[in-house]
Image: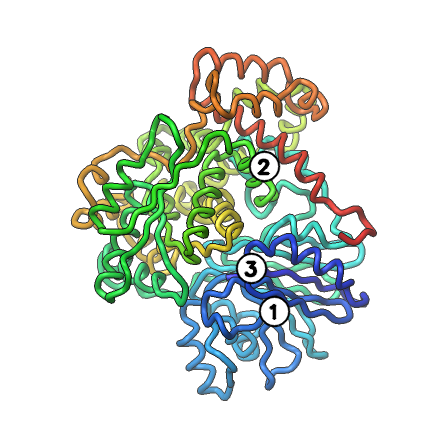
C-alpha cells in the first residue's frame, strides 16, 4: 500500500527535483516507510511506501535487471502475486524479493497493457515503458475502484501528470485547474463528485476497471477492461469466509472496523474465527463514538458483536469540540467536497487504529451496493414509473426542489441549461431498464460502477491512508462481487443472503435491528448549542455566499433558522453540504501552485 506519482511529457526536460519532492511530500502521510522518485528527460515516477507485503523488500519503482526500460509503481495489494510469480518464473523471469508489486514489470513484458487483466487485488498501477520502440505510460486501477488515481492532461504541451491524491497532483508545476462550475450542484445532488470528474476542472479520476495508455504527446486513451475472472464456490457465507481469511493474512498487525451493523459484523466474526483457528492473537476491533449523549449511537451493537466474536474491543470516543478541526483536515485530505458527515468519523477512527499500532484494517464497505441493502432500493422496487427520479433524489444532500430554491437565478439557469448530475443518474437508470435489466440489477450496476467508488471508496482510501492504514474490503473482492451478481433478485433484495450468512455468527440484537448508517449525528450537532453550529453559521455567512454567487444568502439563512426551530436530518444535511463546499473552495485555493512556480 503506497502513494504513487509521476509525469510523462514528450520532448520535455528532466522534472525539477524540488517539484517532485513537493508532490511526494503532500501525500507522504500515506507512505511513511520509504520514498523514491526516479526521473529522466520528459518523465518521472515515484512512490511513498507503506510497507505491508515483504516489508524488507519491494523497493519502488520496481525494476528487474533483465527488463531494462520498464518501471512500475503500485498503490494497493495484489493478492494473487504468488501465483503470478510462479507462472512468470516458469517463463524465465527472476525476482529479487517476494513483494507483490515486483511481478509488474515481468507481467507487462508478457502481456503489454493487458497486464492488469491478470491482477486480483485492490490497486492503482503506473508503468513506464521507456524502450525506444514502445515508449508509453500505462495506468490501471482495480475493477471496483478501491485505489483511486487522479490525472491531469495538458492539451497545450501534451503532458500527463498523475498522483494518488489531488493535493499532490496540484503540486506539479503546470497543473492548471479551477473549481468546476457545476461542482456545487453535483455535491448537493449526489453528495460528492460523480463519474470520472472531480470537483476541479482539469483533474479526472480513472474509472473503476480501466486502463489508460498514454503515448508521447497524446492524451490518455482510456478503456474499460472485462472483470477479473473469479470462481465463487459455495454459499454466501463460504465465499465471504474465504475472502476474509485471505485478506486477514498480512506481515503487519491486522484489526477490524466494527460499526455495529450487519456488514462489518460479518467481517468481524469471520476474521475473529480465522484468528482463533490459526492460533493467532485475538482480533482487535475498533468502533467510533462521540463523548456525551447523542442520538443513533451504535456503540451497544458494536459491543455485542465484539462479545460474540470474542475480540479485543476498542471504543474510541471523540470530543465534539474537535469536530471543527477534523472537518478542515478531512476536506484537505480529500481534495474535493464530500457531503457525508461520516468523513469526520472515518478520519478519527483510523487515527485511533494507527495510534494503537495497526497497519491493516478490515472493513465492511460495498455490501449494501451489491446485496441491495439501501432503503432507496427497496422503495424503488415497489414504486411506479417515476421511480428513477425518486431514486436519484434519494441520493442527494438537498432534494431538487430545495436546490432550485436555494440557487441564485443565474446559477439555476446555468444548471437548467447544462443539466444536473441528478438528470444523468436518472437517465442511466432508465436506459438500463429500457434494455431489459430488472430494477435491482440496474441500481446495483449504477451503485457499484459510479457511486460506490466516488462516494465511499475514495473517502475510505484517503482518510485511512491519512493515517498510513491500509483498509481491506472483503465485499469488494472479485469472488464476492461475482457471487452477489449471480444470486436471484430475491436473495439480493434487502441483503437477505447476508442475513442468512450471519444467522449463526451474529447476535440477534444486530440481526433484528433496523438499518442505520455509520455516521455523525449531524442534526443534533447543528441544533441550538450544538458543537458544529458556530462553524456552519460562519461558513454560510452572507458575505461568503454573496461572493460565491451561487446560493441566495437570505434563503440559506431561512433554512438554518428553520432547522434551529425544528431540527431535522434533511435540513441539517443540506446545511452541512453547503458548509463543506464553502470550506473546500477556501482550502483548494491554498493547494494551488501558481503556474511557473515550484512548490
Q: Residue at x 24, y 66 (%)?
A: 279
The reply to whether residue 438 is in sight is: no
Above/below status of 412 relative to 118: above
Whichever of callouts 2 and 1 sits on the residue coming sooner in the sequence is: 1
Q: CA distance from mark 2 to mark 1?
A: 34 Å
From this viewpoint, which residue is outermost toward the top? 565
Instruction: Say how the picture is coloured.
Output: rainbow
Question: Which residue is at a point 45% across and 52% down the rendered structure image?
Answer: 354
Q: Residues within 10 Å of mark 3 (few under 14, many from 20)?
A: many
Q: Position of residue 476 (x, y in %)?
A: 39, 54
Mark 3 — residue?
A: 31
- Left or right side of 234 for 378: right
From this view, report whether residue 331 is shown above or below residue 527: below
Q: Is residue 374 left or right of residue 190?
A: left
Which residue has dot 2 on it? 328
Viewer-nearest residue: 65 or 251: 251
At numbered mark 1, what does the secondary structure look like: helix, strand or loop?
A: strand
Q: Is residue 292 above or below residue 90?
A: above
The residue where tag 1 is placed is 127
Mark 3 and 1 residues: CB-CB less than 8 Å, in contact?
no
Give the class, few, some or many, for how many residues have Cα within 10 Å of label 2's Cα (few <14, many ≥20). some
Amino acid at each position: 500500500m503506497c502513494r504513487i506519482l509521476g509525469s510523462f511529457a514528450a520532448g520535455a526536460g528532466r522534472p525539477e527535483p524540488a517539484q517532485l519532492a513537493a508532490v511526494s511530500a503532500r501525500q507522504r502521510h500515506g507512505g511513511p516507510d520509504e520514498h523514491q522518485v526516479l526521473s529522466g528527460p520528459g518523465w518521472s515516477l515515484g512512490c511513498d511506501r507503506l510497507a505491508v507485503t515483504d516489508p524488507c523488500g519491494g523497493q519502488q519503482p520496481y525494476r528487474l535487471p533483465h527488463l531494462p526500460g520498464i518501471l512500475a509503481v503500485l498503490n494497493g495489494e495484489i493478492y494473487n502475486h504468488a501465483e503470478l510469480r510462479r507462472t512468470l518464473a516458469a517463463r524465465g523471469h527472476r525476482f529479487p524479493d517476494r513483494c507483490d508489486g515486483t511481478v509488474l514489470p515481468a507481467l507487462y513484458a508478457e502481456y503489454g497493457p493487458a497486464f492488469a487483466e491478470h491482477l486480483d487485488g485492490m490497486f492503482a498501477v503506473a508503468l513506464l515503458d521507456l524502450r525506444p520502440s514502445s515508449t508509453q505510460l500505462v495506468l490501471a486501477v482495480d475493477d471496483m475502484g478501491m485505489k483511486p488515481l487522479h490525472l491531469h492532461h495538458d492539451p497545450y504541451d501534451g503532458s500527463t501528470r498523475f498522483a494518488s491524491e489531488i493535493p499532490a497532483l496540484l503540486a506539479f508545476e503546470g497543473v492548471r485547474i479551477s473549481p468546476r462550475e457545476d461542482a456545487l450542484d453535483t455535491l448537493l445532488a449526489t453528495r460528492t463528485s460523480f463519474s470520472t470528474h472531480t470537483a476541479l476542472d482539469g483533474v479526472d479520476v480513472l474509472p473503476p476497471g480501466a486502463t489508460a495508455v498514454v503515448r508521447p504527446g497524446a492524451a490518455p486513451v482510456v478503456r474499460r477492461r472485462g472483470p477479473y475472472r473469479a470462481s465463487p464456490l459455495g454459499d454466501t457465507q463460504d465465499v465471504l469466509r474465504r475472502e476474509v481469511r485471505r485478506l486477514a493474512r498480512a506481515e503487519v498487525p491486522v484489526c477490524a472496523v466494527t460499526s455495529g451493523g450487519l456488514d462489518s459484523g460479518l467481517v468481524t466474526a469471520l476474521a475473529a474465527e480465522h484468528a482463533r483457528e490459526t492460533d493467532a492473537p485475538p482480533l482487535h476491533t475498533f468502533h467510533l463514538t462521540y463523548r456525551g449523549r447523542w442520538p443513533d449511537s451504535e456503540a451497544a451493537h458494536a459491543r455485542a458483536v465484539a462479545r460474540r466474536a470474542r475480540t479485543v474491543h476498542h471504543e474510541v470516543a471523540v470530543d465534539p469540540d474537535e469536530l471543527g478541526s477534523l472537518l478542515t483536515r478531512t476536506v484537505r485530505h480529500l481534495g474535493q467536497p464530500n457531503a457525508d458527515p461520516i468523513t469526520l468519523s472515518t478520519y478519527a477512527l483510523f487515527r485511533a487504529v494507527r495510534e494503537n499500532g495497526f497497519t491493516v484494517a478490515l472493513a465492511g464497505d460495498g455490501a449494501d451496493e451489491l446485496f441491495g441493502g439501501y432503503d432507496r432500493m427497496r422503495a424503488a422496487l415497489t414504486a411506479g414509473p417515476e421511480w428513477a427520479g425518486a431514486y436519484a433524489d434519494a441520493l442527494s444532500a438537498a432534494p431538487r426542489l430545495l436546490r432550485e430554491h436555494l440557487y441564485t437565478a443565474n446559477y439555476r439557469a446555468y444548471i437548467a441549461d447544462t443539466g444536473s448530475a441528478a438528470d444523468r443518474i436518472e437517465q442511466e437508470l432508465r436506459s438500463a431498464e429500457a434494455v431489459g435489466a430488472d430494477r435491482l440489477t440496474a441500481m446495483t450496476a449504477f451503485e457499484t460502477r459510479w457511486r460506490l467508488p466516488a462516494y465511499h471508496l475514495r473517502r475510505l482510501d484517503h482518510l485511512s491512508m491519512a493515517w498510513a492504514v491500509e483498509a481491506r474490503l472483503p465485499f469488494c473482492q472479485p469472488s464476492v462481487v461475482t457471487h452477489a451478481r449471480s444470486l436471484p433478485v430475491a436473495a439480493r433484495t434487502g441483503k437477505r443472503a447476508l442475513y442468512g450468512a450471519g444467522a449463526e455468527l451474529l447476535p440477534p440484537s444486530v440481526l433484528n435491528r433496523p438499518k442505520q448508517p455509520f455516521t455523525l449525528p449531524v442534526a443534533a450537532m447543528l441544533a441550538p448549542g450544538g458543537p458544529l453550529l458556530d462553524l456552519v453559521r460562519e461558513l454560510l455567512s452572507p458575505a461568503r455566499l454573496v461572493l460565491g454567487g451561487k446560493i441566495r444568502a437570505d434563503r440559506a439563512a431561512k433554512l438554518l433558522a428553520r432547522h434551529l426551530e425544528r431540527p431535522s436530518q434533511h435540513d441539517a444535511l443540506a446545511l452541512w453540504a453547503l458548509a463543506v463546499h464553502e470550506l473546500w473552495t477556501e482550502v483548494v485555493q491554498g493547494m494551488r501552485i501558481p503556474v511557473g512556480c515550484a512548490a
